[in-house]
C-alpha cells in the first residue's frame, strides 16, 4: 500500500452544489445564484440540496431536456401551463375527469376554454357560408368544420386557417346597430355575432389575426429551417394568407397585407398539379382569387403585380350555380385590368420610375395612353354589363334617358341589383367594381388631357369631362337608394369603401374644377344658365340635384365608420370647399 506523504494535499470532498434546475437537467452548474444556465433559460434558480430522484436515464437527452424545461416552467409559473406545452397531452375532453381535476385544475380550465372556443367558432359557420364563401369559393363550410375539429392537433395548417376564416367572418358581418331588424336584408339571423361598435369589431378582428399568426408559427423552434423544409403547401395554407391579407387591409396594414398576398402567390406556384387532377377547378378559382386580390392591392398601393391573366376557371358541378356565375363574372371583370392597364396605372402613380426595370414592367402595346384605348376599355365594360343585364346598358349610359325616366323604372326593368343569376352580395360587388374601373379610366384619361367638354357623336360618354358627375353618380345613387340599407355593402369590408372613395373623390373633382355650364346641361337640357333649383357653392353654381347626390354619397361613405383617415380628410376638405357643412362627417378612431 503506498504511503501518503503528510505534505500531500488532500483531495477535496465533492459536495452537492448544483441548483435544482441544473440537477434535474443533469447539466453543469457553477453554484452561483442565479447560475448562468438558469439565467439563460429564464428559470428560477433554487438550491434545496435534494437529489433528483427522477428516473429516465435511458431517455434521449433532447426529449428529456424539453420535458424537464416544460415541467419547470409550468411549475414555476405558479398556475396555468402554456397551451403549446399541453397540445400533445390534451386530445379529447374526456381527460377532464375528477382524478385529473383534483391533480391539475389548470388542465380542466384549458379544456373548458377550448370547448367554449370550439362552440363559438362553430357558430360562425353560417356567416362564413353566406358572406365569405360566396365571394371566396375555395374552402367549403364542411372543410372549415373539419379544420375546427383539428385546430389544436394541427395548429399550423388548420388552426391558422380557422382563426383567419373567423377574422374574415367578423370583418364581413354588419354591425348589430346597423341591422334594422332581427333578420337583415341578407338573411342573417341575429345573435350569432354581436358587435355594436367599430371599436369592438376592430379588437375582435385584431385578436383573431394575432391568433392566426401565432398558430402558423407555433411549431417553429431553433430548428426552424428544418421545420419549414418539411411543410407541404396546401390550399388551406394559401387561403390563410389570403384571408389574413383581407383582414390586414381592413386594419389599414396595407403593406403587410400586400406581403401576405405575395406569400400566398409564392405558395400557389409550389402547389402540386397532376394530370387529371379532380381538384383542378378549385385550384383555378384559387388562382383567380389571388389575381383579383393582387390587382386591387396593386392599384391601391401603386405597386406592380406579378400574376397575369389566364384561362377562366372550369365549371364545377359541386359549386352552386349562382356562386359559379358570380365568381366567373368577377374574373372577367378584373381581366379588363390587363398588363397595359397596370403599366399605365403604375406610371400614373409614379411607381414605375421609382422602381426602374428591376421589377415587373412589361412593355405595353402603346407607348402612351390614347383616347381609342380608353374608349375600348369602356366598351369592354359595356359588354360585360350587357352580358349580365342585356336590356339595361342603354338605360344606364344613354344621355337621351333623363334621370326621371331611369328612377321611375321598376326593379324588374332596371335589373342590376335584382338579377336572378347572382346573389345580391355578388351583384353589389360587380356593380361597384364596374363603376370603380370606369372612374380609374376617367382618371387616366384626365391625366393625359384626353377628356372633352363637347363630345363628338361617335365618342363614348365616358370621355366626357363631367362623366363621374353625370352617369356614375346617378347610377350609384339610385343603386344605393334601392337597397335601402348599408348592411348589403358591409360584407365587402374595406375593399368596397376604397372603391366608393375613388368614385366620390372623382365626383368632388368634377364639382370643383368643371365650369358650371357643363353641369347645368345635363340637369336642365340647355345652357341658358342655372334654374331656380340650383345651389350656389362659393363662386360656383351647380344643379341642386347633383348637390344632393354628392351629399348623399359622402354621408353614405362616412356612415360605415371605418373609412381610412387620409381618405376621410381628403373628402372632408373637398366637401367644405364646396360650401357644405362637414359637422356630420365623423372619422372612426
Image (cartoon, rainbow, N blue to C red):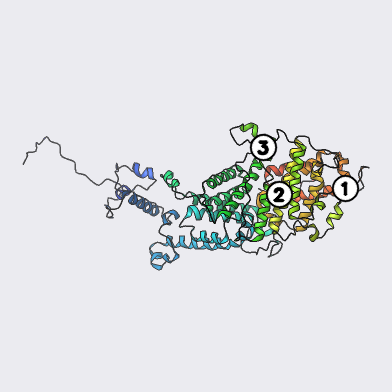
For disc 1, the marked residue is 523
Residue at mark 3 to residue at mark 2: CA–CA distance: 20 Å
Considering depth in this image, is 13 or 41 the residue closer to the camera?
41
For disc 3, the marked residue is 343
Q: Residues within 10 Å of mark 3 (few under 14, many from 20)?
A: many
The reply to whether callout 3 and callout 2 are in contact (CB within 8 Å) is no
Q: Is residue 507 left or right of residue 234?
A: right
Q: Quadrant of residue 175?
A: bottom right
The percent position of residue 444, horizontal first and vertical second, equals 74, 38
For disc 2, the marked residue is 433
Image quarter hosting the N terminus: top left
Residue at mark 1 to residue at mark 2: CA–CA distance: 26 Å
Name the secondary structure under disc 3. Answer: helix
The residue sitting at the right extreme is 528
The reply to whether callout 1 and callout 2 are in contact (CB within 8 Å) is no
In the depicted structure, whether residue 187 falls above or below residue 276: below
Earlier sequence position, callout 3 versus callout 1: 3
Considering depth in this image, is 6 or 206 the residue closer to the camera?
206
In the depicted structure, whether residue 174 falls above or below residue 515: below
The percent position of residue 66, horizontal first and vertical second, equals 36, 50
Amino acid at each position: 500500500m503506498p504511503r501518503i506523504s503528510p505534505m500531500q494535499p488532500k483531495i477535496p470532498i465533492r459536495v452537492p452544489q448544483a441548483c435544482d434546475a441544473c440537477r434535474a437537467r443533469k447539466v453543469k452548474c457553477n453554484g452561483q445564484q442565479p447560475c448562468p444556465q438558469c439565467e439563460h433559460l429564464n428559470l428560477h434558480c433554487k438550491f434545496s440540496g435534494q437529489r433528483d430522484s427522477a428516473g429516465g436515464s435511458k431517455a434521449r437527452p433532447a426529449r428529456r431536456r424539453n420535458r424537464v424545461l416544460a415541467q419547470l416552467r409550468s411549475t414555476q409559473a405558479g398556475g396555468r401551463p402554456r397551451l403549446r406545452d399541453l397540445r400533445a397531452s390534451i386530445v379529447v375532453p374526456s381527460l377532464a375527469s375528477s382524478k385529473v381535476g383534483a391533480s391539475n385544475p389548470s388542465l380542466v380550465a384549458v379544456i373548458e376554454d377550448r370547448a367554449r372556443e370550439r362552440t363559438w367558432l362553430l357558430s360562425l359557420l353560417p356567416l362564413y357560408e353566406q358572406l365569405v364563401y360566396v365571394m371566396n369559393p375555395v374552402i367549403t363550410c364542411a372543410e372549415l368544420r373539419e379544420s375546427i375539429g383539428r385546430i389544436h392537433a394541427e395548429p399550423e395548417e388548420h388552426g391558422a386557417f380557422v382563426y383567419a376564416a373567423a377574422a374574415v367572418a367578423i370583418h364581413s358581418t354588419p354591425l348589430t346597430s346597423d341591422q334594422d331588424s332581427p333578420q337583415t336584408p341578407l338573411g342573417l339571423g341575429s345573435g350569432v355575432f354581436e358587435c355594436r361598435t367599430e371599436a369592438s369589431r376592430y379588437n375582435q378582428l385584431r385578436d383573431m389575426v394575432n391568433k392566426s399568426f401565432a398558430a402558423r408559427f407555433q411549431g417553429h423552434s431553433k430548428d426552424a429551417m428544418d421545420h419549414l423544409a418539411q411543410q407541404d403547401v396546401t390550399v388551406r395554407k394559401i387561403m390563410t394568407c389570403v384571408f389574413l391579407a383581407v383582414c390586414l387591409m381592413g386594419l389599414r396594414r396595407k403593406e403587410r397585407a400586400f406581403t401576405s398576398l405575395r406569400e400566398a402567390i409564392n405558395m400557389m406556384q409550389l402547389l402540386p398539379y397532376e394530370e387529371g387532377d379532380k381538384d383542378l377547378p378549385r385550384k383555378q378559382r384559387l388562382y383567380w382569387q389571388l389575381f383579383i386580390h393582387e390587382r386591387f392591392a396593386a392599384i391601391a398601393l401603386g405597386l406592380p403585380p406579378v400574376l397575369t391573366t389566364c384561362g377562366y376557371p372550369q365549371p364545377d358541378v359541386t359549386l352552386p350555380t349562382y356562386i359559379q356565375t358570380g365568381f366567373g363574372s368577377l374574373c372577367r371583370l378584373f381581366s379588363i385590368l390587363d398588363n397595359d392597364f397596370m403599366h399605365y396605372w403604375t406610371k400614373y402613380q409614379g411607381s414605375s420610375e421609382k422602381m426602374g426595370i428591376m421589377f415587373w414592367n412589361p412593355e405595353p402595346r402603346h407607348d402612351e395612353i390614347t383616347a381609342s384605348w380608353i374608349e375600348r376599355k369602356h366598351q369592354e365594360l359595356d359588354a360585360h354589363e350587357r352580358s349580365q343585364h342585356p336590356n339595361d346598358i342603354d338605360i344606364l349610359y344613354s344621355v337621351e334617358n333623363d334621370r326621371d325616366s331611369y328612377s321611375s323604372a321598376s326593379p324588374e326593368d332596371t335589373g342590376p341589383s335584382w338579377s336572378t343569376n347572382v346573389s345580391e352580395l355578388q351583384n353589389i360587388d360587380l356593380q361597384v367594381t364596374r363603376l370603380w374601373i370606369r372612374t380609374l379610366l376617367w382618371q387616366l384619361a384626365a391625366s393625359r388631357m384626353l377628356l372633352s367638354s363637347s363630345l363628338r357623336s361617335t365618342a363614348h360618354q365616358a370621355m366626357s369631362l363631367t362623366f363621374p358627375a353625370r352617369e356614375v353618380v346617378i347610377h350609384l345613387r339610385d343603386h344605393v337608394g334601392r337597397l335601402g340599407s348599408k348592411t348589403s355593402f358591409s360584407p365587402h369590408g374595406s375593399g368596397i369603401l376604397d372603391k366608393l372613395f375613388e368614385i366620390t373623390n372623382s365626383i368632388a373633382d368634377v364639382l370643383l374644377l368643371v365650369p358650371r355650364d357643363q353641369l347645368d346641361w345635363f340637369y336642365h337640357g340647355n345652357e341658358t344658365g342655372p334654374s331656380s333649383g340650383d345651389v350656389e357653392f362659393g363662386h360656383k353654381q351647380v344643379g341642386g340635384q347633383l348637390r344632393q347626390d354628392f351629399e348623399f354619397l359622402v354621408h353614405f361613405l362616412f356612415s360605415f365608420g371605418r373609412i381610412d383617415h387620409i381618405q376621410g380628410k381628403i373628402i372632408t376638405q373637398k366637401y367644405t370647399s364646396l360650401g357644405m357643412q362637414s359637422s356630420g362627417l365623423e372619422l372612426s378612431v
